[in-house]
Image (cartoon, rainbow, N blue to C red):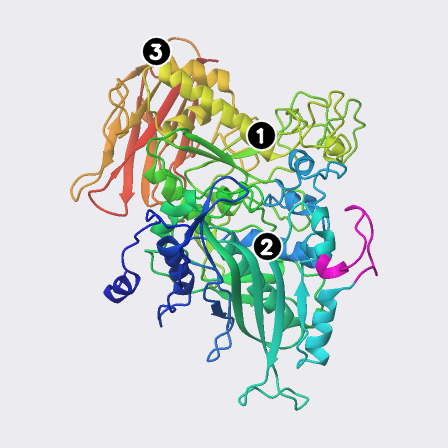
Amino acid sequence: MSPSATTELGPASGPDVQLKPEETPTHKAPRQHASHEEYQYLDLIRDILEEGEHRPDRTGTGTYSIFAPNQLRFRLSDKNTGKLILPLLTTKRVFLRAVIAELLWFVAGSTTSTPLTEQGIKIWDGNGSREYLDSVGLSHREVGDLGPVYGFQWRHFGAEYKDAKTDYTGQGVDQLAEVVHKLKNNPYDRRIILSAWNPADLKKMALPPCHMFAQFYVSFPKDAPTKADGSKQGTLHSILYQRSCDMGLGVPFNIASYALLTHMLAKVCDLIPGTFTHTMGDAHVYCDHVDALKLQIERVPKDFPELVIEKSDDDLSIDGWRVEDFKVLGYDPHKGIAMKIRRTDYEVDLILHENPNLHPVDLAPYVAQIAEDKWDPKTDQLGYDQDATTIDRFIHEHQDLVILIAAENYARERNAGMSQISDNSAAKNCITVGACGSTRSNDGDRYDPNPEESSTNKAVSSADTARFSSRGPTKPSRDPQGQIVFPDRIKPDVVAPGVAVLPAASRVVSLYDRVRERDGVSSDTDWLFMSGTSMATPLVAGCVALIREALQKNGNQHSSAALVKALLINRAVNYSSLTGAGYDHESGFGRVDVSSTIAMISRSPLSGFVDGGNKLESSSVYDVSALRETLTTAGTWESPAITIFEGRHKLVATLVYPDPPGERLQNNVNLIVRAGNSERHGNMGSEPGFDHTDNVERVIWEDLSSKTVTIVAQVQAFTRVSSEQAFAIAWSIRAM
């Protein structure tokens, strides 16, 4: 933070000052920050923390609040360059995918949370749950039916609401269509208003609207550009009134949402996006957000990102927009800050996805050391991006946290190509989990007690990768000429059963919900069939927990994530590559075999492992130093000679290390197994050469003729000389 910014902001005094009941907070004049509009938001939070009145609220948490604070105003375009600006706050990441999805849901006039849930956006799930609907007197509604909320009022104001399944076409006032009509045909109208507040419908809503209404205004400045028909091109401005304003989580979301709506209307009506003004009623900070916001207001904002709208000019309607019509360039927010979320504001899904860089989590002391998640769905294969970078950074900095990520289910999508693994699941240090079949009767996608096999519906066993499971490898990096500058990486890491899995049914799922039949019909309503990599991933998370438990019983109280991953992969079975390289791009290193993995952990001459450079372990017979490289020597760890008993045996050895973040390997460490005068290298089968792409390497060596073998981890190159690299190696020997 610059000295001037520090002086202007001052120290946060916090809300510990006791306010007398009769005191009325007074608002200061806006602080002047020429450098960034985000300071308006940060200054308002500071005002609330310093001057806010302590008030009870319906959640029982309590808030610090002020009424009618200074407005916030944001530019939506750069007059000099013409670039569009999206005011996504940068001092904490805003959950952009949810902003776009929810806004398009509003525009569609939808009143059920199901379309959002199916996209992985769960911000309305709490308000649509059976428990919540019953608690607000809407027990007659189906789960997910939110009543005549925002979108209904925008598109059908005044229509009689029945349920979410009713077709309301032509009923009520389509306010949004009227806004478009007036902006195009009567831009000087002072009644270009969009209202979600309908007193007659409030009791029918699962949640009354917080952001109540917006007004739109078209200006024609003297220097307005001239259009082809000779008329002046107007500039669109918008103002939002919001009655209830959660400064920590809700307001950043609402700013982005209504700014984006203004951009959409400007595009549809051939106007220049001008400004968005946010007017607030009760602006409040929840008591349990205070510490987090004190941290946030000390951060220096970064540039707002550029918005690119890719919707064709030939299809300029307010309807029919897709998430893919928007691209946001240059969004580089600060690391996240965890804040508790009220059910009726933004559901717990937001706390996971609002900051995919994972840094909000305070992990000292750890409560759990395993995290499983299904991250943002993608339709095209993406490369190693910011999300993958931040996942790798997080694991590199917290080396005993195992993160598992579902590979997603895009292998059968139209235009899916040969590889679909991308984005978060392309991270090096996580465990990316694909899906295989199961022993349960299925047609390849769902439970079917009597499957009729065809070319498209063929049962998959536990030895087959599920047809829907996204395939690897990761997307290679190419230069502008299309030449590969960094090759693809092995993904997924492992697979587990993900077809016709039978998990417990949530109590909020209606007996008539279609999800109960989507992947097969269960005879017991307490259970329902589901298929997908998001079923396989929790199974592997459970296996990881069992492995950790076995390690603790063995004396390894704080085993690294690399060791857990090495043990898991070492005993995984790849049915398409039982020997040789031992991996493929459908199932990675193979299907998890947790029983076999746990058997490796007990002390035995037929198996072993090292957890090199693990500084969290107080003492362990397996601990060895981290690998180091200096100007004169390359780091190497070499095992003692491992005895191979008489007979036919197969050795499997696996190296895993948490590489620093970056698309390329930052620290290149190779696995070498030496037997007599021969040696084999990780992921190379019996071929010479080394793998310079992956930080997971495995050697499978059958019919060993040597009486002893030695396993070596050898540094090929470090990005920084004199750095050190933690690593883990697991090995096992089996009779053939």
Q: Is residue 14 above or below residue 684?
A: below
Instruction: Please tell me how crowded label 2 is: few (under 14), some (14-19), or many (20+) other residues with Cα within 10 Å.
Output: many
Tell me the distance, in whole angstroms, between the alpha carbons under discs 2 and 3. Answer: 66 Å
Q: Is residue 571 above or below residue 238?
A: above
Query: Could one spot residue 664 in this view of the protein?
Result: no
What segment is highlighted magenta in the picture? Answer: 153-172
Depth check: 552 or 154 in front? 154
Q: Earlier in the sequence, mark 1 or mark 2?
A: 2
| Secondary structure of residue under mark 2 | loop
Tell me the distance, in whole angstroms, between the alpha carbons under discs 3 and 1. Answer: 32 Å
* Left-right relation of 78 to 260: left
Q: Position of residue 616 (x, y in %)?
A: 28, 28
Kindly identify which numbered label has been placed on residue 602.
none
618 inside magenta stretch: no
Res. 436 image quadrant: top right
Q: Residue at x 23, y 42 (%)?
A: 723
> Disc 2 or disc 3, which is closer to the eye?
2
Q: Main secondary structure of the magenta part?
A: loop
Which amino acid is tagged 2?
Cys
Q: Is residue 381 above or below residue 537?
A: below
| Secondary structure of residue under mark 1 | helix
Tell me the distance, in whole angstroms, between the alpha carbons under discs 1 and 2. Answer: 39 Å
Q: Which residue is denoted by mark 3 in the rendering?
A: 605
* Left-right relation of 532 to 480: right
Q: Position of residue 500 (x, y in %)?
A: 68, 27
Kindly identify which numbered label has been placed on residue 210.
2
Q: Which residue is denoted by mark 1 in the rendering?
A: 536
Q: Residue at x 65, y 26 (%)?
A: 501
